[in-house]
Image: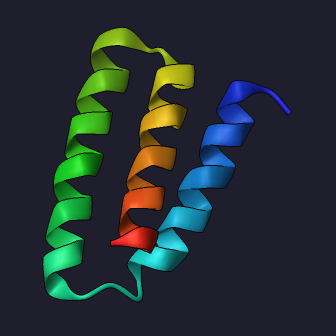
Amino acid sequence: MNQTQELKSTLIQLQSQINQLSAKDKAVYDKSKQDLDILVKNNGQYAIAAVCVKAVELQLSHG
């Protein structure tokens, strides 16, 4: 699986979890996603974005 496919897969999994978040957690996610969007737009480095998404996913799942 290439990095773009891995990122898409991770984002799909994350979106599923987002649907179950409280309002406070969703605000944290929204800010993180905005930061990731800027990162990808400015750098196009999907590997870095995938790592960031995973970090957000872990943070949300472990509080």
Please state if 21 lies on the left or on the right of 44 as rendered: left
Please state if 28 lies on the left or on the right of 18 as rendered: left
The residue shown at (47%, 58%) is 58
What quarter of the picture does the N terminus occupy?
top right
Residue at the outermost top position: 43
- Residue 23, given in percent of the width and then of the height, sits at 16, 85
Figure colour scheme: rainbow
Q: Is residue 26 above or below residue 42?
A: below
In this orientation, which residue lies closer to the viewer: 15 or 59? 59
Residue at the outermost front position: 62
Q: In this view, does 14 lie above or below 35?
A: below
The residue shown at (61%, 40%) is 7
What quarter of the picture does the C terminus occupy?
bottom left
The residue shown at (22%, 37%) is 35
- Residue 43, given in percent of the width and then of the height, sits at 36, 10
In this orientation, which residue lies closer to the viewer: 42 or 47? 47
Q: In which image quadrant can residue 4 be found?
A: top right
Please state if 62 lies on the left or on the right of 10 as rendered: left
- Residue 25, given in percent of the width and then of the height, sits at 22, 75
- Residue 16, given in percent of the width and then of the height, sits at 53, 76
Q: In which image quadrant can residue 21 be found?
A: bottom left
Q: How many labels does the image show?
A: 0
Q: Is residue 28 above or below residue 61?
A: above
The residue shown at (51%, 47%) is 54
